[in-house]
Image (cartoon, grey):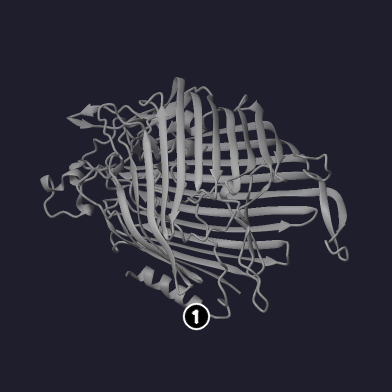
């Protein structure tokens, strides 16, 4: 165990030794962006006579209106062994292998849209958007420490996080979080090093509500361009001679992508209403509570993003087809700064019997500024060494939006949102989306029927339209991407069944291509952003079924996908995840899960990855490679003992000479033992 791991474990042990701090664990609370948030409950723990209260409420808010969505503070005991894997809890992501490396969801209906700062798109394992940022309300100070690790000092990873939050009175809360992720990587020049610091505060009063957070990320990752020969994985005996995985040759060895992000967010609103008094069931005591009728809300979000592509010339510099800037050291800097303000008025739901829904409306303004390299002194593409200029551009938008929402009651809920840009750089942009659900008593429980739909006419991001760097360069006029989607979901918790079927049509689909040329029998790379002017249809069907036979459980997650244009939008026809485990308790206090899980998807021409644009790109037609048809199996043991949750896992237990790639020429990690633990404390 290396020095870093020793000190982290020492910190955890010393913390638990303080019985005044750790009198009793707060049941189950931990943040994981891979978990689907369930609104089954919004508190954990129970207050017992003579004991410190342990209730913790947890929620997220939407970025525009500040509407609160209660979420269940997940225990993470179930599937805890997968919480640090870049492939995701159910193995649904294609990745470059190492912890925190760029990834892309194979399930198209779950794929996040391209971020306006395009370089952030594949880093959703670490970067947390506003709609997934967690806020808390606690009756006692709360702290969580979590640590996951695997491998040796030169190959493994460390993933540490610490969360602390407490209330000031009943209504105000503040907290802080620190995350450290370091993956050395099993392959050459693949290391990742990320740090996050976040602080937040909230106030929930009768008439005034506030949510604030500030977050800073520093992210640095090595880029190796993929392996030069897949046979080191598929047929190692034919090419290697006493080589370790770190010795396998890769295209790049001295190349890095670095990013920093600063986000400040504030949402607050003032309620106008009245106080209502009602009697308890015993008709003796009365309750007085505030009923909001209207509210005035305001949201401001300030974001600053910085990206740096840094590289030293390779001795065999055949990786790139074109070069637009000429220096001995490649040091491309790209930045983005934006300020968005919204102000609006809401008619609240439920203040009278006839007010069966809420109605919100707002106007907003957004300013965006961009800086990136421009031509070198002496003209575009001139070869003499020298400094390059900076191109500075700015954009603005004025927009209006509204919402129709119903959250109260037990039968029908719905939420319809619309936003339209009526002036500015994205003039004509439209985002209309809706969600509806019907809760029906069925099969001894409530069966939920949901409908999700949207219509979007979205202007591609600035850096998709204008991108300047040493090895990729374009300025292009693009059309708005026109998308229509509708999907239905049927779920029942008692039967453990969830069925989702959806269809989407896309016109002017935006994506990256690699049109690099063959030179001296070697393929070079050149990335260009492009659009498909025709229509593409995607059909998706997903089944999640959880079965139990006494202590024996089987969880299945199966997705079928059809794409009408496999060359432009490649998707696997079938993606599967299975988890077979025993769930039992020892001496009524030690909760155990012993099992094995497996991830699998059918062969297809998956997208490649480009370090130059820090994004996934369609494969070069001169070298098409299929990935898939290789299961990744692991065995594990999960344990939950009062305040401590921990696991041990042997990942990729079935490692063989097969093609364990999810991205062409980027192998997944070989088999190895993974460990993790998580402790919750309160005072």
Residue 113 visible in this rendered orientation of the protein: no
On screen, residue 124 versus residue 130, left or right, reads left
The residue where tag 1 is placed is 17
**Quick check: 680 above or below 270?**
below
Query: Quadrant of the image for the C terminus?
Result: bottom right
Residue 446 percent coordinates (x, y):
61, 47
- Please tell me which residue is depicted at 55% across the width and 38% down the height of the picture: 489
- In this view, the residue in front, 394 or 127, is 127
- Please tell me which residue is depicted at 60% across the width and 42% down the height of the picture: 448
Query: Quadrant of the image for the N terminus?
Result: bottom left
**How many residues crowd around disc 1 within 10 Å: few (fewer than 14), some, or many (20 or more)?**
few
- Please tell me which residue is depicted at 28% across the width and 40% down the height of the picture: 629
**Outermost residue, top side:** 534
Residue 121 percent coordinates (x, y):
46, 41
- Label 1 sits on a secondary structure element that is helix
On screen, residue 55 versus residue 589, left or right, reads right
Q: Quadrant of residue 637?
A: bottom left
**Quick check: 644 above or below 441?**
below
- In this view, the residue in front, 209 or 30, is 30
Q: Quadrant of residue 616?
A: top left
Residue 35 percent coordinates (x, y):
50, 51
Residue 159 visible in this rendered orientation of the protein: yes
Residue 661 percent coordinates (x, y):
29, 43
**Quick check: 249 above or below 318?**
below
């Amino acid at each position: 165990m290396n020095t870093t791991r020793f000190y982290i474990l020492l910190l955890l042990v010393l913390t638990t030794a303080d019985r005044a701090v750790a009198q009793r664990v707060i049941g189950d609370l931990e943040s994981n962006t891979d978990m689907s948030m369930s609104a089954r409950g919004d508190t954990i723990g129970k207050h017992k006579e003579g004991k410190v209260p342990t209730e913790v409420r947890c929620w997220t808010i939407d970025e525009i209106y500040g509407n609160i969505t209660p979420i269940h503070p997940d225990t993470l005991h179930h599937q805890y062994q997968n919480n640090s894997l870049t492939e995701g809890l159910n193995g649904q992501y294609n990745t470059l292998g190492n912890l925190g490396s760029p990834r892309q969801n194979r399930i198209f209906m779950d794929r996040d849209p391209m971020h306006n700062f395009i370089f952030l798109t594949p880093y959703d394992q670490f970067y947390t958007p506003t709609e997934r940022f967690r806020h808390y309300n606690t009756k006692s100070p709360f702290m969580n420490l979590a640590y996951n690790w695997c491998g040796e000092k030169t190959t493994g990873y460390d993933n540490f996080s610490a969360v602390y939050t407490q209330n000031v009175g009943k209504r105000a809360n503040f907290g802080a979080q620190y995350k450290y992720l370091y993956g050395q990587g099993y392959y050459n020049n693949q290391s990742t090093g990320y740090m996050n610091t976040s602080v937040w505060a909230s106030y929930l009063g009768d008439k005034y509500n506030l949510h604030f957070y500030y977050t800073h990320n520093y992210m640095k990752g090595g880029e190796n361009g993929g392996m030069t020969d897949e046979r080191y994985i598929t047929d190692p005996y034919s090419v290697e001679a006493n080589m370790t995985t770190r010795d396998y040759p890769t295209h790049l060895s001295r190349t890095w992508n670095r990013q920093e992000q600063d986000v400040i967010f504030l949402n607050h609103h003032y309620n106008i209403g009245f106080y209502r008094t009602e009697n308890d069931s015993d008709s003796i005591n009365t309750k007085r509570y505030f009923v909001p009728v209207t509210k005035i809300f305001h949201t401001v979000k300030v974001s600053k993003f910085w990206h740096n592509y840094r590289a030293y010339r390779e001795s065999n510099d055949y990786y790139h087809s074109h070069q637009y800037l000429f220096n001995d050291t490649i040091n491309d800097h790209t930045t983005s700064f934006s300020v968005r303000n919204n102000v609006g008025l809401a008619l609240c739901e439920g203040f009278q019997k006839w007010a069966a829904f809420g109605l919100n409306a707002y106007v907003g303004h957004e300013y965006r500024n961009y800086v990136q390299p421009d031509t070198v002194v002496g003209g575009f593409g001139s070869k003499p060494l020298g400094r390059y200029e900076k191109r500075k551009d700015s954009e603005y938008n004025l927009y209006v939006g509204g919402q129709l929402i119903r959250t109260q009651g037990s039968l029908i809920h719905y939420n319809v949102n619309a936003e339209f840009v009526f002036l500015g750089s994205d003039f004509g942009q439209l985002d209309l989306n809706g969600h509806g659900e019907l809760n029906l008593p069925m099969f001894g429980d409530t069966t939920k029927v949901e409908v999700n739909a949207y219509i979007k006419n979205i202007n591609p991001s600035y850096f998709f339209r204008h991108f300047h760097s040493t090895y990729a360069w374009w300025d292009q006029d693009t059309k708005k991407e026109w998308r229509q989607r509708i999907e239905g979901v049927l779920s029942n918790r008692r039967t453990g069944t969830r069925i989702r079927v959806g269809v989407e049509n896309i016109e002017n689909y935006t994506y990256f291509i690699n049109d690099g040329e063959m030179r001296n029998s070697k393929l070079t790379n050149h990335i260009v952003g492009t659009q498909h002017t025709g229509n593409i249809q995607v059909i998706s069907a997903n089944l999640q079924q959880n079965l139990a036979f006494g202590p024996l459980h089987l969880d299945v997650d199966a997705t079928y996908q059809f794409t009408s244009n496999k060359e432009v939008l490649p998707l696997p026809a079938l993606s599967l995840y299975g988890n077979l485990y025993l769930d039992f308790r020892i001496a009524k206090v030690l909760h155990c899960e012993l099992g094995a899980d497996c991830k699998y998807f059918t062969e297809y021409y998956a997208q490649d990855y480009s370090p130059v644009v820090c994004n996934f790109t369609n494969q070069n037609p001169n070298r098409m490679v299929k990935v898939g048809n290789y299961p990744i199996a692991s065995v594990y043991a999960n344990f939950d003992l009062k305040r401590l949750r921990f696991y041990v896992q042997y990942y990729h237990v079935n490692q063989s000479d097969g093609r364990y790639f999810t991205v062409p020429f980027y192998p997944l990690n070989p088999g190895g033992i993974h460990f993790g633990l998580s402790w919750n404390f309160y005072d």
